[in-house]
Amino acid sequence: MMLFGKLFTVATLATAFTALGVAGSNNIDNKEAFIVFGNSMSDVGNKLAIFGQKAYWNGRFSNGPVWNEYAAAFLKLPLVNYAIGGATSSNTALVNGTTSSGALIPSLLDQIDAFLKNNTNIQHPEKNTMVLEVGGNNILWPLATDPKYVMANKDKLIDGIANDMMTGLQKVFDAGYRRFLVWNVPGADHSPEMPNNQDVKNLVNEIITSANSKISDGLKSFNSKNKPAFSQLFDAHTLLGNVQDQKVSKALNLTDTTTACVQSDSGMYKPDLKVCDNGYQHLYYDLVHPSTRVHNLLGAMVSEIVKDPKTTTFNIDSMADLATKNNINSATAENNAVIKSGINNVPGFVKGL
């Protein structure tokens, strides 16, 4: 999730979309792969790498690797990543389908279409695992530009997130893919980005809660109608909320679970951003995005669910145990599960950058 500045041009976005999928590979070459579609929560350099930003690590919207890099490393699978910062579920889900600058951003459905176009001769698509993660920007974009629109069109926003997610699932199922992990919308309502306005927080919470309920119901319907599809819900909203619990935050060695290390939601247009001294100990690296230790734990949980489909979610105790098991409390950009695994799936993944 992120809010874009007004200098992001349509031409730049076209270039970015052309490059979609270069993180890892844009072709799965008939090998089992971990394939990701989403927004800045999942972006591994498809967006920020274009601009460069010292406050952000190697094009990620964080201070180290993000969740899908950790998950792919834990699973020992090649990563194919089409996620791009700022993406919504579709470009018909917003006011006029654009940002405040009028620039179109490749949405979840655009990313899926691009992937399917690039991979037309896959012999065993059913062996791959696909992850769909999107939704926050459907709320944050219009909230930043026209809060009254959000209030007047909350039902449209809710339906747009859930319906587009199911449309995307159907597209990849019809192309032969069978294994899916679907994120619900994380809790933007309790991130540092949210204004100190209880009415706004209540509105955002209502939209997220309703959208997540529709996503859950949609998955149940999708599975019943599309056998042998196997789709599972990743309850990112609850799990990220659990990180604020003292037991989990202690297991991650987080000392600040409420404020941001970097006072930005993207940093692309603020080259002199100040970075705090203890970013690894923050839950939020910036106003919207988690630090790499939180991503590490998210990736570990995703990998456990993919390895054992009977694992459906985690509680506070099991999250803390998983963090301890993987020594996440000392993880940094230079020392973490991705680098230790020896599986550096993403070009430009440089130790210590």
Image: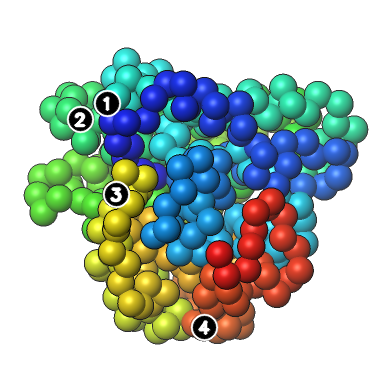
At which x and y percent is residue 152? 17, 24
Quarter assignment of residue 214? top left
Q: In the current view of this chain or complex, which residue is farthest to the top?
A: 96
Kind of residue indicated by mark 2: Thr
Give the residue displayed 49% in from the left and 82% down from the top: 329
Give the residue displayed 55% in from the left and 41% down from the top: 46
At which x and y percent is residue 122? 85, 31
Q: Residues within 10 Å of mark 2 (few under 14, many from 20)?
A: few
Q: Which residue is mark 3?
A: 270
Of callouts 4 and 3, which one flags the residue occurring earlier in the amino acid sequence? 3
Front residue (pair 115, 205) = 115
- Position of residue 196 in the picture relative to residue 52 (left or right): left
C-alpha separation, residue under disc 2 versus residue under disc 1? 7 Å
- Residue 181's place in the image compared with 251, above or below, is above
Q: Secondary structure at mark 2?
A: helix
Q: Are marks 2 and 1 in contact (CB under 8 Å)?
A: yes
Kind of residue indicated by mark 1: Ser
Give the residue displayed 63% in from the left and 68% down from the top: 351
Q: Nearer the viewer, mark 3 or mark 2?
A: 3
Q: Which mark is residue 336?
A: none
C-alpha separation, residue under disc 3 versus residue under disc 1? 18 Å
Quarter assignment of residue 155? top left
Give the residue displayed 41% in from the left and 37% down from the top: 86
Q: Residues within 10 Å of mark 3 (few under 14, many from 20)?
A: few
